[in-house]
């Protein structure tokens, strides 16, 4: 089986792809982004809960070869908090948008078939494959214009409330507030913050 190598995509490339996705599927910029509705109704993809997916494959979800189904670990699907579930859907949408070549001509659906196909990637390819989809998910669930505005408002409010210097504002505290606003985990919001800081610093 031929090894798959994802195309090189910069963070800005992924940002543009996420922005185009939102322009098409969430033009009203609804927050939190209704990713489940987008996946099911706009993209026409079935969401299939699978018992024990995480314990068997160590993944939250995967997309079938025909891109008609996103299989999600049942524990995540039924969890009281929807943050991880929402990120999983956005992550898989990222694979579909960014890695179309990976899915072309694939007929697999069963979990073991997906596992065999996924194993054709080497370590670097696997890492880029997942980093790109994670970045896409974060940029879709926390859209850039709204994200930047929210960060500025939170920082300004914190300065006013604490009477502190800017460097005294903890990034983790900002991440917690961002997470609540956008319907994501604090970890996802923190990663997004650090990615933006890295992009700005070059």
Image (cartoon, grey):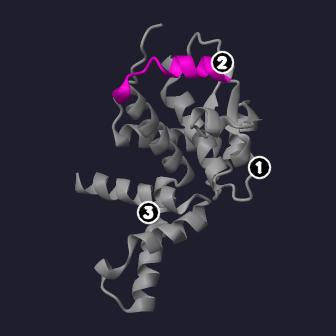
- Tell me if mark 2 has few (under 14), some (14-19) or many (20+) residues whose alpha carbon lies within 10 angstroms of its own: few
Residue 175 drawn above or below residue 164: above
> What residue is pinned by disc 1?
78
- For mark 1, give the secondary structure: loop
Would you say the magenta stretch is mainly helix, strand or loop?
Answer: helix
Question: Splitting the image into 4 quarters, where does residue 61 fall?
Answer: top right
Q: CA distance from mark 3 to mark 2?
A: 36 Å
Direction left: furthest residue: 202
Q: Is residue 153 left or right of residue 21?
A: left
**Residue 116 located within the stretch drawn in magenta:** yes
Please name the residue shown 57% across and 37% down the image.
58
**Disc on the earlier residue, 1 or 3:** 1
Question: Splitting the image into 4 quarters, where does residue 51 fall?
Answer: top right
- For mark 2, give the secondary structure: loop
Please name the residue shown 66% across and 35% down the image.
53
> What residue is pinned by disc 2?
66
Q: How many marks?
A: 3
**Disc on the earlier residue, 1 or 2:** 2
Q: Tell me residue 162's x, y (percent).
A: 41, 90
Can you tell which mark lies on residue 148?
A: 3
Please name the residue shown 69% across and 20% down the image.
110
Residue 130 drawn above or below residue 188: above
| Residue range highlighted in magenta | 111-124
Q: CA distance from mark 1 to mark 2?
A: 25 Å
Please name the residue shown 39% across and 20% down the image.
5
**Residue 142 located within the stretch drawn in magenta:** no
């Amino acid at each position: 089986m031929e090894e798959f190598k994802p195309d090189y995509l910069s963070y800005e490339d992924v940002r543009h792809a996420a922005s185009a996705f939102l322009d098409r599927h969430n033009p009203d910029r609804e927050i939190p982004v209704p990713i489940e509705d987008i996946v099911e109704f706009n993209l026409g993809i079935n969401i299939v809960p699978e018992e024990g997916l995480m314990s068997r494959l160590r993944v939250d979800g995967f997309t079938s070869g025909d891109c008609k189904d996103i299989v999600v670990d049942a524990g995540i699907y039924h969890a009281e908090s929807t943050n991880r579930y929402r990120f999983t859907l956005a992550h898989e949408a990222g694979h579909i948008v960014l890695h179309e070549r990976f899915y072309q001509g694939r007929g697999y659906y069963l979990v073991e078939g997906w596992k065999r196909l996924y194993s054709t990637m080497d370590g670097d390819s696997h890492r880029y494959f997942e980093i790109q989809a994670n970045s896409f998910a974060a940029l879709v669930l926390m859209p850039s214009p709204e994200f930047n505005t929210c960060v500025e408002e939170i920082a300004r409010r914190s300065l006013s409330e604490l009477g502190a210097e800017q460097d005294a504002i903890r990034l983790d505290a900002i991440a917690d507030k961002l997470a609540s606003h956008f319907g994501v985990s604090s970890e996802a919001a923190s990663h997004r913050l650090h990615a933006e800081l890295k992009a700005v610093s070059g």
